[in-house]
């Protein structure tokens, strides 16, 4: 039944705002019409049966307990009840179908998988957002005219996530996920509020939804998935040769290697990454000039890292090693000399 209602309503309605505005306008129109009819009929009867001062004979008046005669058998009463019942039942069925569409637009699993998905977590009187590619911005940003699915949960107590201008409201319960969606037609900023009394700073648990043009949103997302790495020595001078860098994702099979030629003046910008999350970066020398550098980072937005290459460390170790060999040779020479002197004596 859910699928049938969704199929009937989907061609007419596309957003949650459209659905609730349609329900509001229908009920407002019918309520206004019924109100006009009732008030008009009341005024009509008040005027028709007003006291004109011409009272009839007492013989024509019914006595106490006597049923009035000359009526039409209550046809008007039954007709009014019948029409009212049809209107009410129709409204219930239609409204139920509209609300089912809000719960499930009927796009199918494939359409939902292709849509933008964001996990929303309420915790410590703030809202946190994580996109399906691992990006975690401070505000929720979405493209205009595209459906967005939200997986709402909580990290501490019960909250209720709501975007009033988009008619969105979903419970945030620890350990559970409440799924909801919305589709904003107009770019702009919309308020996020908590609708569950959750503690001392409940009223401050707010946020912002920024609806962007699709092209602008795509550019913003590309910027969030940009990595910049810079290599410097102990003197903060750029290192331009003698190394290789390996970048790998900790949870996927993503792995890439870069040489010093891929860097420009000791710096490289990587802007074709598709997944955020935790990465490992390893910088190894090609000529044993320095010790390998191994670092890890969590990519939740643009990454700009500067790594210091201890180019003098390896040289110092080499010098120490050479010095030790020289001292050992001198010691051996002195020992041989002393042995020779002892033999002569």
Image (tube, rainbow, N blue to C red):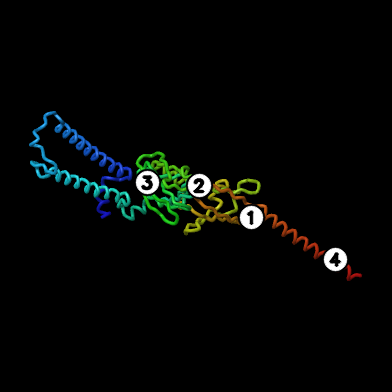
- The secondary element bearing badge 2 is classed as loop
Residue 302: mark: 2
Give the crowd class for mark 1: few <14, some 14-19, many >=20 residues within 10 Å.
Answer: many
Asked whether the viewer can see residue 21, the reply is yes
- The secondary element bearing badge 1 is classed as loop
Q: How far apart are marks 2 and 3 (CA)?
A: 29 Å
Tell me: 53 left or right of 163: left
- For label 1, the residue is 290
- The secondary element bearing badge 4 is classed as helix
- Closer to the eye: label 3 or 4: 3
Nearest to the observer: residue 62 or residue 108: 62
**Percent coordinates x, y for residue 228 in the rendering:** 53, 47
Give the crowd class for mark 2: few <14, some 14-19, many >=20 residues within 10 Å.
Answer: some
- For label 4, the residue is 337
Q: How far apart are marks 1 and 4 (CA)?
A: 39 Å
**What residue do we see at 29% from left, 41% from top?**
24
- Closer to the eye: label 3 or 1: 3
Mark with earlier residue (2, 3): 3
- For label 3, the residue is 168
Mark with earlier residue (4, 2): 2
**Percent coordinates x, y for residue 257 in the rendering:** 52, 55
**What residue do we see at 27% from left, 54% from top?**
3
Mark with earlier residue (3, 4): 3
Residue 233: mark: none
Marks 1 & 4, CB-CB < 8 Å contact: no
């Amino acid at each position: 039944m859910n699928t049938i209602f969704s199929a009937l309503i989907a061609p007419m309605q596309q957003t949650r705002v459209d659905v609730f505005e349609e329900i509001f306008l229908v009920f407002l129109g019918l309520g206004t019409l019924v109100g006009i009819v009732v008030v008009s009929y009341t005024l009509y009867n008040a005027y028709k049966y007003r006291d004109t001062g011409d009272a009839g004979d007492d013989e024509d008046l019914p006595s106490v307990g006597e049923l009035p005669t000359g009526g039409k058998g209550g046809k008007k009463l039954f007709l009014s009840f019948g029409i009212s019942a049809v209107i009410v039942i129709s409204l219930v069925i239609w409204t139920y179908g509209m609300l089912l569409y809000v719960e499930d637009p009927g796009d199918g699993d494939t359409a939902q998988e292709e849509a933008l998905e964001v996990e929303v977590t309420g915790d410590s009187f703030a809202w946190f957002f994580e996109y399906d590619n691992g990006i975690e911005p401070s505000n929720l940003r979405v493209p205009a005219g595209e459906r967005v699915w939200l997986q709402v949960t909580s990290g501490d107590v019960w909250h209720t996530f709501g975007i009033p201008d988009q008619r969105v409201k979903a419970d945030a319960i620890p350990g559970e996920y409440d799924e909801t969606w919305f589709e904003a037609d107009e770019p702009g900023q919309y308020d996020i509020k908590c609708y569950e009394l959750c503690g001392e700073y409940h009223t401050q648990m707010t946020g912002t939804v920024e609806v962007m043009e699709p092209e602008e949103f795509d550019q913003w997302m590309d910027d969030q998935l940009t990595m910049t790495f810079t290599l410097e020595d102990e003197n903060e001078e750029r290192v331009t040769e003698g190394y290789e860098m390996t970048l790998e994702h900790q949870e996927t099979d993503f792995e890439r290697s870069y040489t010093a030629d891929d860097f420009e003046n000791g710096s490289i910008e990587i802007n074709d990454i598709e997944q955020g999350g935790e990465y490992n970066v390893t910088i190894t020398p090609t000529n044993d000039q320095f010790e390998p550098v191994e670092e890890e980072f969590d990519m939740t937005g643009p990454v700009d890292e500067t790594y210091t290459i201890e180019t003098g460390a390896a040289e110092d170790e080499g010098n120490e090693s050479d010095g030790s060999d020289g001292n050992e040779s001198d010691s051996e020479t002195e020992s041989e000399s002393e042995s020779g002197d002892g033999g002569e004596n």
